[in-house]
Image: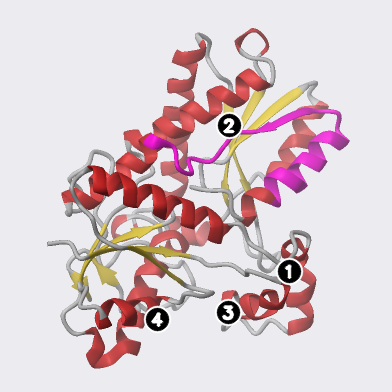
Amino acid sequence: MVDAVLVVSYGGPRGPEDVLPFMRNATRGRGIPDERLVEVSGHYQRFGGVSPINERNAELMDALGEALRERGLDVPVVIGNRNWTPYLADTLRELAASGLRDVRVVITAAYSSYSGCRQYREDLAGALAELGEEAEGFTFTKIGPYAETDGFVGANARALVAAVRELGGAEDLPAVLFVTHSIPTAMDAASGPGGEEGTYHAQHLRVAEAVAREASAELGVEVPWELVFCSRSGAPHIPWLEPDVNDRLEELAADGVERVVTAPIGFINDHMEVVFDLDTEARETAEGLGLGYVRAATVGVDPGFVALLADAVVAGERGTIAGMPTCGASCCGSGRPGAGAPTVLDNEGVS
């Protein structure tokens, strides 16, 4: 019997005073001085020090709870974050105190990679270790990665069709840039089941193709598309997935393209990488180049996407929904030289 649904996410600051402590948490172990953190956190301060991820996750939790009740499952939907309150360990402690120990886990990242899946599983294992004896009796069943499911693809296709129609429609198609978060190429190479090379990148290409195919059928014309990346960070000498969305916008403008839609298929809702990297930075780039620009919606609380998550929670077992692979103890390495294999939550528990 399911006792609760645990949404596991990144977390984000709720006010200006939270930004620096949040940035310290997000970069823990990298030795980055506060002076640099203050410099790079300007995009949060541009929005009053508030990350939209908290409100968007709350909306998703409300929608998921309602969808579960429609399916006859009336249980608490709670959240635990990696980098800001409520932290995972605190949420698990509250669940334990309430006797809620059979937990379905939903991660707010759709694809297979270290940062988008395995690291959250490590976070869960670490939170259990922090609880000690309080953690006894917990049973976790994790859903996802869910990027290649019909529910996720369909929601993105509907958003793309709406954006294309806003910017010219089928009679005058804009260029379509599917956008996702860049990661180091070494991390991409280590992503997937058992370190299957390049799963993260390959999944995005398959999802982009499926979304474009569905949107093309609705529009009655083939949508031209390509995959680009945003939010690159880290040392310049370390290769990350490319091209950057802003670089590609410049190239398209030089080739005579006049209108562009960015479709953020790598993100499930409008958090900072969307509202800053795409709604602000990429939009400013496009406007400076004289490009017409529209950003498609994220899947957010699209009914089809929420139904996917609710069905997976009710099903209770990974792999029972088409396109949803199974996580194992060896999945999605970090790609860092010499990195070990920390304790990780897999579909059976902790390994």
Q: What label does residue 193 carry, if any?
A: none
Q: Are marks 3 and 4 in contact (CB under 8 Å)?
A: no
Query: Helix, strand, or loop for circle 4?
Result: helix
**What separation in Å lies between label 1 and label 3 (alpha carbons)?**
13 Å
Q: Compare marks 1 and 4 and give the one earlier in the sequence.
A: 1
Query: Helix, strand, or loop for circle 1?
Result: loop
Query: The C terminus is located in which quarter?
Result: bottom left
**What separation in Å lies between label 1 and label 2 (alpha carbons)?**
30 Å
The x, y position of residue 301, in whole percent, is 45, 42
| Magenta segment | 276-303
Quick one: 264 or 269, which is closer to the camera? 269
Label 4 crowd bin: few (<14), some (14–19), many (20+), radius 10 Å? some
**What separation in Å lies between label 3 and label 4 (alpha carbons)?**
16 Å
Q: Compare marks 1 and 3 and give the one earlier in the sequence.
A: 3
In which quarter of the view is residue 271 placed? bottom right
Q: Compare marks 2 and 4 and give the one earlier in the sequence.
A: 4
Q: Which residue is mark 1?
A: 41
Residue, far bottom: 133
Labels 1, 2: front one: 1
Residue 304 in the figure: left or right of residue 349: right
Tell me the amino acid under the disc marked 2.
Glu
Q: Is residue 238 visible?
A: yes
Q: Which residue is mark 2?
A: 226
In this view, 127 is above or below 174: below
Query: Helix, strand, or loop for circle 3?
Result: helix
| Residue found 30% across the figure and 74% down from its top | 344
Q: Compare marks 1 and 2 and give the one earlier in the sequence.
A: 1
Query: The N terminus is located in which quarter?
Result: bottom left
The x, y position of residue 80, in whole percent, is 41, 70
Residue, far left: 1
Q: What label does residue 25 carry, if any?
A: 3
Q: Which residue is mark 4?
A: 90
